[in-house]
Image (cartoon, helix red, strand yellow):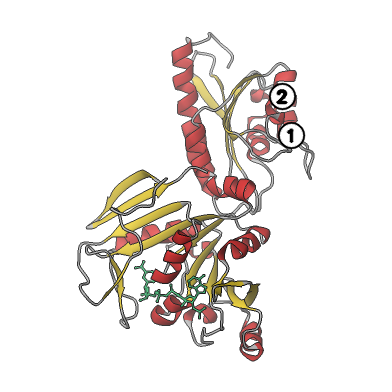
């Protein structure tokens, strides 16, 4: 930043403050940037009176391009010269459809780049920072790196594990049940929690449930928040024998929100043709012990460009994902009422979180308690 240099501790505090703002900004397009992560960039310079002034902001555009740095530099124009750029992910170093962002930052005359998360993409890893340093740009790495990585966990999981990040989300009654046998959808949580789920869906690439839930609850699995109705991600149903009825809400909404059925290759071709005519897409899956083989399915979803999958149950599917060690994040909403003896037990609750997970946050939504656990990549 131009102007008098603040001391080291004040500079570090300032760097954390602007990086936190860049991370918050990066959320804007979460779930809408295709195979790219939603990155945030903020360009800051001295306002001439020793105070920092934001001169450019950018978020990865919907669809993944242009990158955040390009947008922020365009807004800053000449004011980028001598400024500090805060980037939530190491700037890219490879020539794609546009020149690398690292070069764009150099060409714009940025004096300092503060980065957060590292990019595991071998075309970028370390190379973006190397371009900047070679051009005399001061680089500070890993400022709020964990917080930034958290925000782009889907992208990082897909890069490192070749599968989408899996979030298991369940609503539990006070006695640890997720529903009542044969009772259809049972209201467990209140309105605020329901709306929070919509928000979570809006940021995911897909929602996945088992056919048990699809038949029992007839859910739509969409985002029904005012202003975000067009942010519903694809729905995926594990349904080996194609039991999903054409009359279900899932099928009737297929012209607005994509619906995939993961079925076995030998499932009834007539049923498949009928649903295909209605607009349903199929993912032919391998089976393992008579069930859809989950690791292979997740690989296929990553190949379709999906970086985050929200598994919303039911009990059997949740248990299968946990048993196969395929869950990266657990989100539980616990309501105040008990369901009782005839309830369906949840395969996981706050007192029985698998080893390796750490609690990330706990909140209260009206009478419901929200808690979230993650494990490191
Ligand atoms: N409170 C909550 O958060 C919540 C959320 C969702 C559901 N629920 C409740 O849960 C109940 C339904 O749960 P559920 O256990 O009966 O059904 P489910 O888990 O939704 O679906 C299980 C079915 O999915 C199919 N499947 C395919 N591959 C699988 C695999 N690898 N692992 C597991 N299943 C696979 C199997 O049917 P095929 O063999 O035919 O393929 C299996 O029977 C409902 O009462 C619903 O209300 C509660």
Secondary element at tag 1:
loop
Residue 338: x, y in percent? 20, 68
Residue at left 62%, top 63%?
296
Residue at left 47%, top 26%?
16
In this view, 7 is above or below 122: above
- Of the four image quadrants, the one with ligand 1 is bottom left
Q: Quadrant of residue 3?
A: top right
Badge 2 crowding class, 10 Å Cα cut-off, few under 14, some 14 to 19, many 20 or more, is some
Residue picked out by circle 2 = 130
Badge 1 crowding class, 10 Å Cα cut-off, few under 14, some 14 to 19, many 20 or more, is many
Does residue 255 appear in the picture of this structure?
Answer: no
Residue 185: x, y in percent? 34, 76
Residue at left 39%, top 81%?
216
Q: Quadrant of the N terminus?
A: top right
Instruction: Say which label, 2 or 1, has the lower sequence index.
Output: 1
Q: How many angstroms separate mark 2 from mark 1 (CA)?
A: 9 Å
Asked if disc 2 and disc 1 are in contact, CB closer than 8 Å, the reply is yes
Residue 148: x, y in percent? 51, 37
Does residue 267 appear in the picture of this structure?
Answer: yes
Residue picked out by circle 1 = 93
Secondary element at tag 2:
helix
* Horizontal arrangement in the rendering, residue 313 relative to residue 308 (left or right): left
Residue at left 34%, top 57%?
332
């Amino acid at each position: 930043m131009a102007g008098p240099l603040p001391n080291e501790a004040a500079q570090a505090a300032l760097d954390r403050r602007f990086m936190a703002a860049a991370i918050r900004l990066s959320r804007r397009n979460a779930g809408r940037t295709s195979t790219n992560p939603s990155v945030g960039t903020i360009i800051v310079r001295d306002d001439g009176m020793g105070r920092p002034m934001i001169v450019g902001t950018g978020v990865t555009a919907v669809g993944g391009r242009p990158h955040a740095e390009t947008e922020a530099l365009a807004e800053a124009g000449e004011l980028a010269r001598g400024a500090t750029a805060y980037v939530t992910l190491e700037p890219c170093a490879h020539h794609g459809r546009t020149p690398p962002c690292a070069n764009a930052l150099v060409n714009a005359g940025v004096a300092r780049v503060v980065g957060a998360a590292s990019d595991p993409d071998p075309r970028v890893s370390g190379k973006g920072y190397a371009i900047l340093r070679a051009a005399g740009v001061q680089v500070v790495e890993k400022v709020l790196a964990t917080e930034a990585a958290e925000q782009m966990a889907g992208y990082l999981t897909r890069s490192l594990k070749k599968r989408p990040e899996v979030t298991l989300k369940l609503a539990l009654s006070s006695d640890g049940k997720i529903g009542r046998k044969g009772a259809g959808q049972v209201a467990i949580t209140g309105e605020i929690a329901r709306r929070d789920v919509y928000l979570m869906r809006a940021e995911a690439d897909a929602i996945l449930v088992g056919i048990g839930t699809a038949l029992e609850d007839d859910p739509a699995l969409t985002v029904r928040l005012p202003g975000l109705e067009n942010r519903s991600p694809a729905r995926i149903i594990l349904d080996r024998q194609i039991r999903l009825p054409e009359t279900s809400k899932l099928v009737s909404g297929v012209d607005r929100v994509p619906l995939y059925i993961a079925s076995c290759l030998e499932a009834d071709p007539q049923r498949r043709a009928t649903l295909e005519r209605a607009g349903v897409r199929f993912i032919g899956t391998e089976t393992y012990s008579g069930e859809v083989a989950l690791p292979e399915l997740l690989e296929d979803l990553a190949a379709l460009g999906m970086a985050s999958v929200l598994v919303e149950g039911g009990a059997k599917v949740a248990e299968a994902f946990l048993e196969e060690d395929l869950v990266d994040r657990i989100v539980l909403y616990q309501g105040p009422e008990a369901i009782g003896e005839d309830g369906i037990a949840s395969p996981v609750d706050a007192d029985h979180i698998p080893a390796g997970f750490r609690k990330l946050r706990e909140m209260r939504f009206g009478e419901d308690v929200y808690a979230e656990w993650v494990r490191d990549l």
